Image (tube, rainbow, N blue to C red):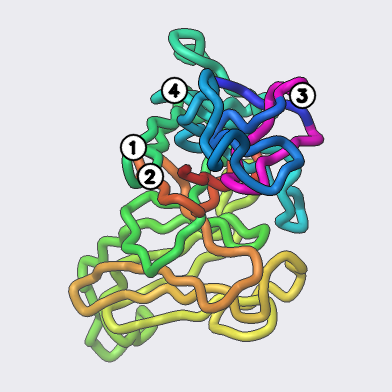
């Protein structure tokens, strides 16, 4: 597995392969002459001895503006990204780290936590059904979804002992502090949909400048299924990775605040 750590990378203009040998005259991926306009050699053929297989996948590290700041080429079948910076550990060396194991597949990368990673998220590209205990990252807000069991006990005598509610609650959204304590909550019942945003919505976080005016919508279906979707936020909606999860080419993930994009060759 080749690792490219140089902050100033050179790419082939023809196929995009990263140039790892500054003395090479030809691209290792397609054979194009470095700095030239097309394949070298008679009749446009590639010279002998030039490897023809480019990297299968790469991780592109993104800065706060979403611009690529570093590219890590992956040439093997698996690697681990650790929470101590962004480092690639190869082979058996990754077993003891806290981070994420990346297993390359034909149509994406399987991401799985290793140890106890800090804040491992995958950014969603479609409306996604949530599982009990899933944690969402919306702007700088960390929201946990929990199933809620309502026993349906209502007091109907002359003394009002509880609030009249529209139906049995089946879920609760918990805003988490940095130490894991719950700061605020929002309840869901079948048929309810809430909008979360900085300026508009049922749950507004006016103090969070990293959240979009309209950020995410969370819906509780009639059968109690909870789903979340991005409603046009500028920095996306992410869900915690608690087990194996497929990440498609072009999809972003975040580990300990480092945002990276998976790109398949």
- Of label 4 and label 1, which has the lower sequence position? 4
Task: Where is residue 238? Give x, y as percent.
Answer: 51, 56
Q: Nearer the viewer, residue 30 or 123?
A: 30
- What residue span does the magenta drawing correspond to? 7-24
Q: Nearer the observer, disc 1 or disc 3?
A: 3
Tell me, for residue 105, which label it has, or none. 1
Q: Residue at the bottom extreme?
A: 158
Say which of 222 and 62 sits in front.
Answer: 62
**What is the crowding at mark 3: few (fewer than 14 residues within 10 Å), some, or many (at least 20)?**
few
Q: What residue is shown at x 41% (from left), y 58% (from top)?
A: 145
Sooner in the amino-acid sequence: mark 2 or mark 4: 4
Per the image, the residue denoted by label 3 is 22
The reply to whether dot 1 and dot 2 touch (C-beta < 8 Å) is yes
Which residue does the numbered mark 4 point to in the structure image?
76
- Disc 3 element: loop
Query: At 51% across and 21% down in the image, what residue appears?
Result: 48
């Amino acid at each position: 597995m080749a690792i490219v750590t140089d902050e100033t990378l050179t790419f082939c203009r023809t196929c995009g392969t990263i140039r790892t040998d500054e003395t090479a005259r030809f691209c290792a991926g397609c054979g194009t002459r470095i700095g030239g306009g097309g394949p070298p050699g008679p009749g446009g053929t590639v010279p002998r001895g030039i490897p023809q297989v480019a990297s299968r996948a790469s991780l592109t590290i993104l800065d706060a503006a979403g611009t690529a700041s570093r590219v890590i080429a992956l040439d093997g079948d698996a690697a681990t990204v650790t929470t101590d910076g962004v480092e690639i550990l190869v082979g058996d060396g990754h077993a003891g780290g806290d981070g994420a194991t990346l297993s390359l597949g034909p149509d994406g990368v399987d991401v799985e936590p290793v140890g106890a990673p800090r804040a491992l998220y995958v950014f969603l590209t479609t409306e996604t059904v949530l599982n009990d205990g899933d944690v969402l990252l919306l702007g700088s807000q960390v929201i946990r979804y929990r199933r809620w069991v309502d026993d349906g006990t209502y007091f109907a005598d002359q003394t009002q002992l509880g609030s009249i509610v529209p139906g049995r609650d089946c879920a609760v959204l918990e805003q988490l502090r940095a130490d894991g304590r719950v700061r605020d909550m929002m309840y869901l019942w079948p048929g309810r949909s809430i909008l979360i945003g900085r300026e508009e919505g049922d749950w507004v976080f006016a103090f969070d400048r990293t959240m979009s005016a309209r950020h995410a919508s969370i819906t509780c279906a009639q059968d109690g299924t909870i789903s979340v979707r991005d409603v046009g936020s500028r920095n996306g909606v992410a869900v915690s990775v608690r087990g194996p999860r497929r990440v498609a080419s072009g999809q972003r993930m975040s580990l300990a605040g480092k945002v990276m994009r998976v790109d398949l060759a």
